[in-house]
C-alpha cells in the first residue's frame, strides 16, 4: 500500500551537513489507494500502520503524521483531522493569544520557515500541506484531549482548532 524509501537524517557537525543512516526509517514515495478503495467501498474503515516497503522489500517505519498526509492527499479526502495536545496552530507558540483559527498552507509553510512552528508540530503541519497539495479539500489540527473536539471542528462554522486550507475564501 505504501512504497517507501530510506530516510537519511541531517547531522550537523563542524559547520557541515552530513546525511546519516538511522536504520529502517523511511519516507513515503507513493501511496497505492486500490486496497483502501476496496475496503472503503465494502463499508470498512481501514486502519493503516505507518510503515512502507522499499524497493528491495525492506520495511520502513514512517512518521504517522507524514503517512496520514500522504494518504489523505492520494485519496483526495474531504478532510484530514490531525489530533495533538494543543489547541491548534499559533503564530507564536509561546503566546496563547496568537491562536490562528484558519490559515493557508502557504502561510503555514512560512511559519515553519520563520521558526514560529517547531518540534512535533512541524510534521503535523507538513502533513496538512502534503494532503492539500495532493488533493485533499481541508485539513484541521485539533486538541485531541478535549471532549467532542472532532464534532465541534467538523460541525460548527468556526471550529475549535486550526483549519489549514489551500486558499482563504
Image: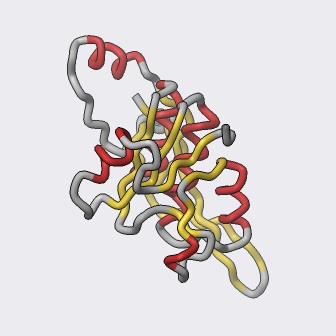
Camera-side residue: 125 or 102? 102
Check the picture and name the quadrant holding the C terminus: top right
Give above or below for 85 relative to 59. Answer: below
- Colouring scheme, one of rainbow, by chain, secondary structure, one colour: secondary structure
Residue 166 rendering spot, x and y as whole percentages = 65, 39
Examine the image and state in which quarter residue 80 appears.
top left
Check the picture and name the quadrant holding the N terminus: top left
Residue 140 rendering spot, x and y as whole percentages = 46, 48
Number of residue marks: 0
Camera-side residue: 130 or 104? 104
Residue 107 rendering spot, x and y as whole percentages = 70, 55
Examine the image and state in which quarter residue 21 appears.
bottom right
Q: Is residue 73 visible?
A: yes
Most extreme residue toward the bottom is 14
Q: Which residue: 67% across, 42% down?
A: 168
Most extreme residue toward the right is 15
Q: Is residue 59 visible?
A: no
Residue 81 rendering spot, x and y as whole percentages = 40, 45
Most extreme residue toward the front is 157
Camera-side residue: 56 or 101? 101
Q: Which residue: 38% across, 43% down?
A: 156
Examine the image and state in which quarter residue 15 appears.
bottom right
In this image, 128 relative to 103: left or right?
Answer: left
Give above or below for 82 relative to 114. Answer: above
Q: Which residue: 31% across, 13% down?
A: 38
Amino acid at each position: 500500500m505504501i512504497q517507501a524509501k530510506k530516510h537519511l537524517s541531517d547531522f550537523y557537525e563542524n559547520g557541515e551537513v552530513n546525511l546519516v543512516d538511522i536504520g529502517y526509517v523511511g519516507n513515503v514515495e507513493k501511496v497505492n489507494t486500490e486496497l483502501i478503495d476496496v475496503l472503503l467501498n465494502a463499508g470498512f474503515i481501514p486502519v493503516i500502520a505507518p510503515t512502507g516497503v522499499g524497493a528491495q522489500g525492506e520495511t520502513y517505519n514512517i512518521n504517522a503524521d507524514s503517512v496520514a498526509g500522504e494518504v489523505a492527499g492520494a485519496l483526495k479526502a474531504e478532510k484530514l483531522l490531525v489530533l495533538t495536545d494543543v489547541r491548534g496552530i499559533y503564530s507564536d507558540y509561546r503566546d496563547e493569544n496568537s491562536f490562528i483559527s484558519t490559515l493557508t498552507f502557504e502561510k503555514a509553510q512560512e511559519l515553519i520557515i520563520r521558526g514560529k512552528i517547531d518540534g512535533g508540530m512541524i510534521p503535523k503541519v507538513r502533513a496538512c500541506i502534503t494532503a492539500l497539495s495532493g488533493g485533499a479539500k481541508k485539513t484541521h489540527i485539533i486538541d485531541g484531549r478535549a471532549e467532542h473536539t472532532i464534532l465541534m471542528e467538523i460541525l460548527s462554522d468556526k471550529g475549535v482548532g486550526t483549519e489549514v486550507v489551500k486558499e482563504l475564501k
